Image: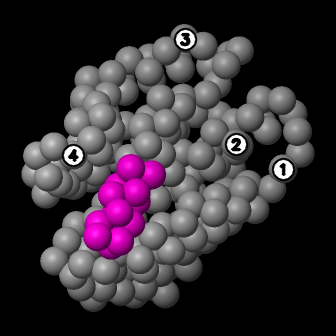
Amino acid sequence: MSFPVLLNLILFFVNSMLWTGFINNNFGGNRTLEINFSFSITKLLINFFEFNNIPYNHFLIFIGSLLIIGGFGIVLFLFIQQDRDKIIYGFTIGTIITLLVYYDSWNHHLLTLIPLLIIIIFNLPKDSKTASKIIKPSIIFFCFFDLAFMGIWHLTQYFFPYNFGSTIFLILCLCSIGKYCLKQENN
């Protein structure tokens, strides 16, 4: 499974500038310092510090977000005991964590999450409050209203550069899926 990814290492060894550009763009370059409409927690914090001219280290913000949210996800995944559904919930939790932590999580990245949420809706019991009160409204928001929030960001970016609508729904999904998994484990 990791073989295709490892093939990229050949390109990095042949042209070391590709490696430098990859690291700078994804983990430490100037692009992470630009204010943009990303809905990740890391980017919301960077936008806050950048907008208010507060000194910060973008890599420390990334690592802090990763440790808090990723640590929560790992602990949650470790407590899921049922083997049958562990892959569905684990992959969904991992995708949500990636969207919340990475520097630039944009609207088109939600395409990786929405099918997983649909699978979870069918996997949950029919009378599940998690599905009816959190997951279904989240899918509706991601599919229909998220682009409107990006448009609002473009109109308000000069005095309010925060696009947090999707962030709220991602956190709700993460917490509700986690609560369901822990509740199932106790039963």
Which comes before the other along the chain, label 4 or label 2?
Answer: 2
Name the residue type under label 3.
Leu
SS of the residue under disc 4: loop
Residue 166 horizontal/vertical position (percent): 44, 35
Name the residue type under label 2.
Leu
Name the residue type under label 4.
Ser
Q: Which residue is mark 1?
A: 56
Asked if the residues shown at circle 1 and circle 2 are in contact, with their CB atoms under 8 angstroms apart, the answer is: yes
Name the residue type under label 1.
Tyr
| Res 47 seen here | yes
CA gap between label 1 and label 3 equals: 26 Å
Q: Residue at x 61, y 28 (%)?
A: 162
Above or below, 42 relative to 37: below
Instruction: State the residue in front, 17 or 95.
Output: 95
Tell me the quarter of the image containing the N terminus: bottom left
Nearer the camera: disc 2 or disc 3: 2
In the image, which disc is placed on residue 128?
4
In the image, which disc is placed on residue 45?
2
Start-end of magenta stretch: 174-187
Q: Is residue 57 left or right of residue 4?
A: right
Q: Residue at x 38, y 50 (%)?
A: 176
Q: Is residue 139 left or right of residue 43?
A: left
Q: Which residue is mark 3?
A: 155
Above or below, 47 relative to 55: above
SS of the residue under disc 3: helix
Residue 99 horizontal/vertical position (percent): 45, 52
